[in-house]
Image: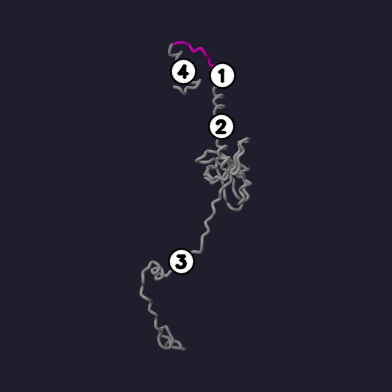
Amino acid sequence: SPIRRYPDLVVHRLLGELIEGRKPAADFAELVVLGDHCSDREQRAEAAERELIKLKLLSYLSERIGEEMDGVVTGVERFGLFVQGIELPAEGLVHVDSLADDHYYFDRASHTLAGHRSGNAFRLGDRVRVAVTRVDLDRRELDFRLVVPRSAKKGPADASERGDVRQRGDVRKRGVELPPRRKKRKPPGGSTKKGRRPGGRGR
């Protein structure tokens, strides 16, 4: 295989010697030292790869200050939230000082950053909307701020929401003409209730 690493080659050599009936030349102590050396080199290579990816992401975002993105909270600390983008895997800090809507405190037991008055709380795994505010390439730092969606201002309730739309008026709005209502005729004397006389009680 063209992607074989050096530890794979060592194992293949040992297997080849055993298949041929020969005792492996390397002893156990040498294999332990070789394994530690290979593991250390692999970890350093992975760290260099992560550092290069981070540098390229920061360089890309340095020209996009103010750009918004969806992210996931990957860390909660006393000083703020670590958020990683979903589409663009860049991780940055939302500093607690930028959360101006409330005074937030760190709850170590639940690993949560919670507000005293509003009841807002941020914890691991929460999805948030953030905007890029600062990029420092030399220090490999990225700062976000939370994008708080504006609550839609609800205008005056219309007639249907108030519940005071009359059936006839609602029908007229739909373009259906109804015959005019008949006016009730008052009986002589001005009384409108049965059994009552003008100026007296009904017998």
- Indicate the secondary structure of the residue bearing disc 2: helix
**Which is closer to the viewer, label 2 or label 1?**
2
Q: Which residue is mark 2?
A: 52
Residue name at image x 49 percent, y 13 percent:
24
The amino acid type found where label 1 is placed reads: Val
Q: For the residues marked 1 and 4, what is the alpha-carbon distance in whole angstroms?
A: 18 Å
Residue 12: image tag? 4
Crowdedness near tag 2: few (<14), some (14–19) or many (≥20) residues, C-alpha within 10 Å: few
Residue type at numbered disc 2 = Leu
For the magenta stretch, what is the residue range? 21-34
Check if mark 1's residue and mark 3's residue have beta carbons within 8 Å: no
Q: Which residue is mark 1?
A: 33
| Residue that mark 3 sits on | 159
Mark found first going from the N terminus, 1 or 3? 1
Residue located 57% across and 27% down the image:
44
The mark closer to the camera, 3 or 2, is: 2
Where is residue 202? Give x, y as percent: 43, 87
